[in-house]
Image (cartoon, coloured by chain):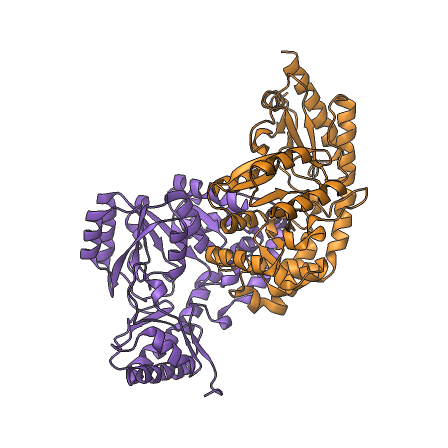
Chain colours: A orange, B purple
Amino acid sequence: MSELTPINFTRGVPAVESFPVRDITKAAVAAMLDYGDSLMQYGSALGFLPFREWLANWYGVQPNEVLTTNGSLQLVEFLSYHMIQPGDAVYTESPTYDRTLTLLRRHGATIVGIPLEADGPDMAALEAALKKRVPKFFYISPDFQNPSGSTHSLEKRKRVVELAEQHNFWLVEDAPYRWLRYRGAEQPTLFELARHRVLHMSSFTKIIAPGVRLGYMLGAAEVLAKIAKIAEDTYISPVFVAHGIAYEWCRRGHLPDQIELLKKLYAPRLDACLAALDKYMPDAKPTRPDGGFFISVQLPEGAPTTAVRAAAAKRALNLADGLAFFPNGGGERFLRLPFCALTPAQIDEGIGRLAESVNEVRSK
Amino acid sequence: MSELTPINFTRGVPAVESFPVRDITKAAVAAMLDYGDSLMQYGSALGFLPFREWLANWYGVQPNEVLTTNGSLQLVEFLSYHMIQPGDAVYTESPTYDRTLTLLRRHGATIVGIPLEADGPDMAALEAALKKRVPKFFYISPDFQNPSGSTHSLEKRKRVVELAEQHNFWLVEDAPYRWLRYRGAEQPTLFELARHRVLHMSSFTKIIAPGVRLGYMLGAAEVLAKIAKIAEDTYISPVFVAHGIAYEWCRRGHLPDQIELLKKLYAPRLDACLAALDKYMPDAKPTRPDGGFFISVQLPEGAPTTAVRAAAAKRALNLADGLAFFPNGGGERFLRLPFCALTPAQIDEGIGRLAESVNEVRSK
């Protein structure tokens, strides 16, 4: 047993072999030569203007509708400072991104988890919750959601927007995986459906690399200006040296090619993960996403994730607990499977070990 | 009047001509080639280990006694999350760094300002305050303080440490200007006097450039681990791309030369500022620092800073208000003069305009 190579289905990290180190290096030299003085001085808390202009053009918005930060998680922190007073209600999907829950709790939010189905939030549960208490915002991730892998249908997207209009709450749309669609048809973002009602967040973490720490938010200029003031009070300005390098890499036109490269790399890994689940765990009923980083599985009765984790650890298979993704409890048999940083062979081996671990727990 | 070139005595920004853009560019290429994959992946919230090792060696501490962040201001934010519950007392010098006050207030601290004298805190006021309420920490900047320019005597440093020991509170020592001593003898840091009692903060903003956003804290490993957890919850990891570049620049041995270059550039600016004050405002009694970025002046009776600012604006001289530096009021005639980003000729011209502005206000 101890000779097995460890396999990690733990956090959603990109594949190291996807990092465009060579082109980032070239971009770094060009960025320093062309605007080194600007990159090395203090600047606007909204971010490096040429980069905000580039993103604005890419998304079809105005530069003052773009705010950049050192990673997108920090946007949740600044947004929470701006919008949440202790006790305020915030909705999330259930399950949802665990790090967002940590920050919402830090700010004293009363978190209401709306159960997530394969095609988006449980709309009856959402409407029932709204009858009790309207949130400040609904944190929602419609494309290849972390941790479930689910993608929202057009109908549910439209209905969520309608309800937000009707009850007057913000939609905070987190879409870092959206560009990684391996098949199927794209749905409009909530931001495209109702710009005045939605703050759209994304990140270059999943496309370029986490180490550039480059998140951004699109939304109403007056809201972003207030969030930027909180950012300024916290760190004066984001890391212009890193953002200038990423900007130059984008300006050189690398983004579309990089997205294609990632799709070619990751699509077979998604397929390998689904195939291995069908092979080793035919009753598992995983989510079957068309993109992103994650598949999730509801483990069978009698196989709680905590026990399966322990059994898996003996097989050098590292799993994450599911409980942290659920704001109001539940998730005892939930398992997230991040497949992007593993080769198809590792995935097949890992799911095999997972099936053994589940069987061991169930046979006890 | 409208043809005058604007002169800014506003914020403490370094001189653009001091930025080591060429060597930073070379360091960026080397850093990407040597450890690009590590710089582009998620990493420890404590920071990029080789850089923490380098800093640990520079300061004579262990790597787990070093935490790096995206600028040192954010350390105040994380520290506040760790140490302050709403209503807790925190001491600062009065005046003190205005951005620190903003963050302490954000966390609900009850701020007690200890009046600052030319050689450090007013010790009678400090002892009197301690009889009323012991703080969680005393935020203190003993070297070329922002905004006053004052430097603490050895006697006061020792006494502050004694009182912290006796009353059991932390000292948070902010020392970003310490390396910029243009003359005179260095005093030990509070950290050197009592490592177990002091969290020592500094930054590369004033030495390399603000745009690298690289702050760090030295202190007890178990405290830094807790602050790093708050950092992780906020942004996962700091911007390794930027920190790796700064590390490589340091590893190549540029830091001592850069400090010498800055001293040669800034010392004549300090001298020009003092000479101009003696020439145009002989009664001004400015602080006379031996280093750093700032001189401060108490304007004469009948010349509040707000009125002088307005008169100065007509002469294209931009000044900052003094009020924001004082946690508990006061500072109506306080004026900070950041001299580093101005040439000696601009400084002479600017202080001349300042004297005219003061005279205009007093003659009204």
Q: Nearer the viewer, residue B113 or B162?
A: B113
- Give residue A158's position: percent from left, percent from top: 72, 45
Q: Nearer the viewer, residue A144 or A320?
A: A144
Residue B359 vs A210, above or below: the answer is below
Answer with the quarter of the image where residue B182 lies.
bottom left
Side of A68 where B139 appears, left or right: left
Decide if residue B68 is in sight here.
yes
Decide if residue B347 is in sight here.
no
Side of B146 where A21 appears, left or right: right
- Most extreme residue toward the right is A184
Answer with the quarter of the image where residue A27 lies.
bottom right
Side of A36 where B360 appears, left or right: left
Q: Nearer the viewer, residue A300 or B347?
A: A300
Q: Quadrant of the C terminus of chain A?
A: top right
* Residue drawn at the location 33% of the way across and 64% of the way down: B144
Q: Quadrant of the N terminus of chain A?
A: top right
- Give residue A234's position: percent from left, percent from top: 47, 55
Side of A142 where B107 appears, left or right: left
- Give residue B228's position: percent from left, percent from top: 46, 43
- Give residue A153's position: percent from left, percent from top: 75, 40
